Image (tube, rainbow, N blue to C red):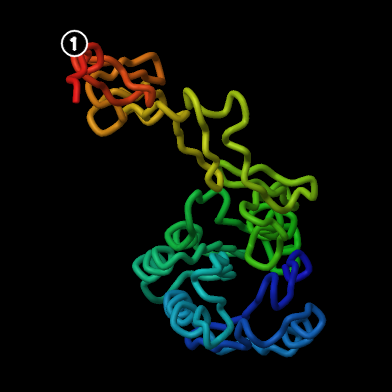
């Protein structure tokens, strides 16, 4: 089984437990990071006394193996936790509740029955779907028949695990490899790893009627001088240049689309400054000194 794994400190970590009527952690996840040392240690394991305390073994795995102190990586890394129970007997303790608690804690359980193993017990402890988590072999000597099946079901390396890829934003696992992608509003650069904010103001990418302002993967709309943005935040309406406070006309403001001219009330004439007005009577009939 170990030969099917990508063993290493930053890949697959392995612990081995030995159980019968008692349970012994032969080595935890933090001990060996190469296959040769691991297999050498396994070759020296001696069977424990008779008994099949499978529930106790699973609980010990939860309490003593899958801890950060013993080599489990932090939960934020999202590294899968897997237990393979290999047995040739019937559990002598309760496994249903213990196995259920382990599965609830995020541990995936595979059950391998050998020879006269109780298949019903294997099905009780294994994860769903059962046809992918429960296996049977006639003897320990032919357990290697399962290695290809294990490789298919749980030995695939997650190439998108932290530290295994070079994607700037999104990593997409792809059959033993990976490809990079970007968040919405970004586009993948030619290096196929990093991302750049797209020009959201390129023609056809926005809904602004007049002016588009690009803003780090998003955009906002604005208007030309003399126009104001409508409540829909997209279209624009001409500003009333003759509204109070928007012009310099003394008497009458005449709007001409985006511009204006000044005029005067009847009896007045526009002065040369084109803004103020003077009474016509004062211009035509000046009072002599």
- Quarter of the image containing the C terminus? top left
- Quarter of the image containing the N terminus? bottom right
Q: Report the side of 85 relative to 44 (left or right).
A: left
* Residue drawn where x is 64% and y is 58% of the image: 154
Task: State which quadrant residue 280 falls in.
Answer: top left
Q: Secondary structure at mark 1?
A: loop
Q: Report the side of 203 relative to 193 (left or right).
A: left
Task: Name the residue that disc number 1 marks.
Answer: 267
* Residue drawn where x is 53% and y is 85% of the image: 50
Asked if one can make out residue 42 in the rendered structure from this viewpoint, the answer is yes
x%, y% of residue 172? Answer: 65, 49
Q: Report the side of 37 relative to 114 (left or right).
A: right
Which residue extends farthest front? 289
Task: State which quadrant residue 281 falls in.
Answer: top left
Asked if one can make out residue 156 in the rendered structure from this viewpoint, the answer is no
Count of numbered tags = 1
Q: Is 35 located above or below residue 216 in the figure?
A: below
Which residue extends farthest right? 36
Q: Is 229 located above or below residue 23 in the figure?
A: above
* Residue drawn where x is 71% and y is 60% of the image: 165
Q: Nearer the viewer, residue 161 or 219?
A: 219
Q: Is 32 located above or below residue 216 in the figure?
A: below
x%, y% of residue 84? Answer: 58, 68
x%, y% of residue 9? Answer: 70, 78
Using a 10 Å C-alpha cutoff, classify the residue at mark 1 as few (fewer than 14 neighbours), some (14 to 19) or many (20 or more): few
Q: Nearer the viewer, residue 217 or 174?
A: 217
């Amino acid at each position: 089984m170990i030969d099917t794994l990508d063993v290493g400190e930053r890949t697959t970590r392995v612990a081995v437990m030995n159980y019968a009527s008692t349970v012994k952690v032969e080595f935890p996840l933090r001990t060996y990071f190469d296959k040769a040392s691991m297999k050498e240690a396994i070759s020296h394991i001696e069977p424990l006394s008779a008994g099949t305390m499978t529930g106790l073994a699973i609980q010990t795995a939860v309490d003593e193996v899958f801890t950060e102190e013993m080599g489990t990586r932090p939960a934020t890394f999202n590294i899968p936790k897997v237990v393979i129970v290999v047995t040739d007997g019937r559990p002598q303790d309760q496994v249903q509740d213990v196995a259920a608690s382990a599965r609830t804690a995020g541990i995936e359980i595979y059950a391998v029955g050998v020879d006269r193993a109780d298949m019903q017990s294997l099905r009780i402890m294994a994860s769903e779907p059962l046809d992918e988590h429960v296996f049977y072999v006639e003897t320990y000597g032919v357990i290697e028949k399962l290695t290809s099946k294990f490789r298919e079901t749980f030995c695939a390396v997650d190439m998108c695990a932290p530290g295994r890829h070079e994607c700037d934003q999104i990593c997409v696992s792809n059959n033993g490899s990976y490809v990079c992608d970007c968040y919405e509003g970004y586009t993948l650069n030619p290096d196929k790893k990093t991302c750049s904010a797209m020009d959201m103001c390129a023609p056809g990418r926005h809904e602004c009627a007049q002016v588009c302002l690009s803003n780090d993967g998003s955009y906002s709309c604005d208007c030309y001088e003399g126009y104001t943005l409508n409540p829909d935040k997209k279209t624009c309406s001409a500003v009333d240049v003759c509204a109070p406070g928007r012009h310099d006309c003394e008497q009458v403001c005449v709007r001409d689309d985006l511009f204006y001219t000044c005029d005067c009330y009847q009896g007045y004439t526009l002065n040369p400054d084109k803004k103020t007005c003077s009474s016509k009577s004062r211009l035509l009939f000046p009072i002599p000194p």
